[in-house]
Amino acid sequence: MTDQPERTIRAGFAAGGYLNINKPQGWTSTDVVRKLKGITRSKKIGHGGTLDPLATGVLPICVGAATRFADTVLLGTKSYRITMELGSSTNTYDSTGDTTAEADWSSETLDQVTAILPQFSGKYDQVPPMFSALHHEGKRLYELAREGIEVERPARPVEVMDLKLVSFEGPEIVLEVVCGHGFYARTLAHDIGEGLGTHAHLTALVRTHAGVFKLEDTVTIDEVSTAADAGDWRTVAMPIDTTLQHLGETKLNENFVEMVKQGRQLAIGDIGKSGDYGSGDRIRAYTPDGELLAILIFEPEKLGWRPEKVLAAI
């Protein structure tokens, strides 16, 4: 683990935070949540974006009040280091599955691999794998796949902001990708293999960042357990407002704090100047002690700021 950024323990009604976990290989995301639920003794806990059991790296865990802001994690950009192997495809598109086809890869060259990558950059439509958690007529696709059933999957728009070739030492290709929400690295590996006229599958995957969460800032499950045994798991957590830094902020007086806690609207002039904000703008509201209290949304047509998300006791 590298040096950690300064972490703030926030007590009281806004208890909670993010655990930036370095997920171990072989664990499902649900396994990690279940383990950390026991360690933190929190009734509210969830992950901010599924990683396959094969994958390692950044898995943001929302604990307590941070679960209110899971969407700010899920919709952020993500980056991965992808290792794939040419010559065979599998039903899961990775090395955990059964081989479905094989082909000679020895004629593939560095120039050919480099030339095909632009096809998978920018915005394009990607067909999700059968072994995925997407639904089809009330069932998960992976449930159907385990029954030997394959159904047509509509392609979904994805975006790849950056795709780089790290190395090609046949049959292994290593890539680095920066992508948006809903992108499947396993499908990328499979599709590159098909595009090269051979087959391919994913053999390793490391998520190096998800939104504001970075691999160099991760902690292990054991480190969280050690911190909990020492008195407080939050000493290795990141504050609730970690994912909200793109929003403006304001500190409320005690009267306004009580109004917000009761769900009452604040007047336009209570926060800055009306000309500083547009309709629908959001702002972080803190107590006089510097504790995140709520997200307020500006509604000039209603002449005020409405509490959109108020953090209650957890």
Image: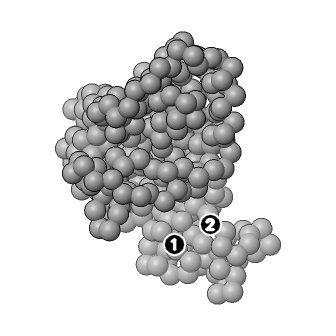
- Along the line of sight, the residue nearer the viewer: 313 or 165: 165
Q: Quadrant of the C terminus?
A: bottom left
Using the rendered image of the protein, determine whether residue 6 is visible from the camera's viewpoint. no
- Which image quarter: residue 97? top left
Residue at the bottom extreme, as displayed: 302
2 or 1: tag closer to the N-terminus: 2
- Which image quarter: residue 67? bottom left
**Amino acid of disc 2:** Arg
**Where residue 96 appears, x then y in whole percent?**
30, 31
**Amino acid of disc 1:** Glu
Say which residue label 2 marks: 282
Instruction: Tell how many labels.
Output: 2
CB within 8 Å, label 2 to label 1: yes
Say which residue label 1 marks: 308
- Along the line of sight, the residue nearer the viewer: 51 or 164: 164
Q: CA distance from mark 2 to mark 1?
A: 9 Å
Q: How is this picture coloured? A: one colour
Q: Name the secondary structure under disc 1.
A: strand
Q: Residues within 10 Å of mark 1 (few under 14, many from 20)?
A: some
Q: Name the secondary structure under disc 2.
A: strand
